[in-house]
Amino acid sequence: EDDLDQFIIDYISFSENRANKHIVCEFFLYAILKCKEPRFIENESKLIKASSTIPSCLTIDEFIDVMENICPLASERLLRWLYAESAAFCHEPYDAVPVPRCAQICSYLELLQLAPVIRETVTLKVGQGLLNTTSYRPVTSTLNGKMSDHQSDNPFMTMTSVKDNTEGKNSGVRPTTSA
């Protein structure tokens, strides 16, 4: 739970409290590159078990074999390309890539596989949120503290009505604000 809280704080800091699909995608790429993505450590532990030739490094064959189990839908061509890019960047003396780099590739590929599901879920939640806020009209007040005539027949929101509203969803009570 602390990791989730930290991840949320990182997102808010990164996005400056804004949300759209581009910022979310950029944040996940940022989290992967900074090794802060939640599944990164899990992927790293899976990959380190496959490292048999060179300690803490994976050869291309080891990487492809283990990735078939972790991300079965990833194409071998994409795996080879990402591995080659990472190997060119690492400048390792052996023909291998360090496990943390491979874990970044693994996290990215998992995110690519989950992206359509995440996108659909976020779209659905945002749509539901917009539907819930379109019926919201704040109560306006005059300078002397009385409510305006057009909303004076609506009851004020109480904690009991909030609890009932979350259980029943339609209690007819609207939230109020004061000026």
Image (cartoon, rainbow, N blue to C red):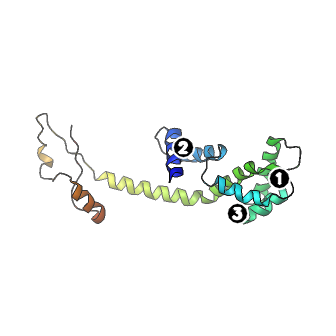
C-alpha distance separating marks 2 and 3: 27 Å
Residue in view at x 30 percent, y 61 percent: 166
* CA–CA distance in space, label 2 to label 1: 37 Å
**How many badges with numbers are in the image?**
3
Q: Secondary structure at mark 1?
A: loop
Q: Earlier in the sequence, mark 1 or mark 3?
A: 1
The residue carrying pointer 1 sits among few (fewer than 14), some (14 to 19) or many (20 or more) residues within 10 Å by Cα, namely few
According to the picture, the residue beneath numbered tag 3 turns out to be 70
x, y percent for residue 89: 79, 41
Instruction: Establish if 14 lies above or below 106.
Output: above
Mark 1 touches mark 3? (CB < 8 Å)? no
Assess whether mark 3 and mark 2 are in contact (beta carbons under 8 angstroms): no
> How far apart are labels 1 and 3 at the CA level?
20 Å
The kind of residue tagged 2 is Ile
**Residue at the far top in the pictured view:** 143
- Asked if residue 26 is positioned above or below residue 112 in the image, the reply reads above
Left or right for 117, reference 94? left
Q: Nearer the viewer, mark 1 or mark 3?
A: 1
Q: Nearer the viewer, mark 2 or mark 1?
A: 1
Of 17 and 48, nearer the camera is 48
Indicate the amino acid at tag 3: Ile
Numbered label attached to residue 55:
1
Whether residue 161 sits left or right of residue 83 in the image: it is: left
Which label is found at residue 23?
A: 2
**In what element is the residue under mark 2?**
helix
Asked if residue 71 shows in the view, the reply is: no
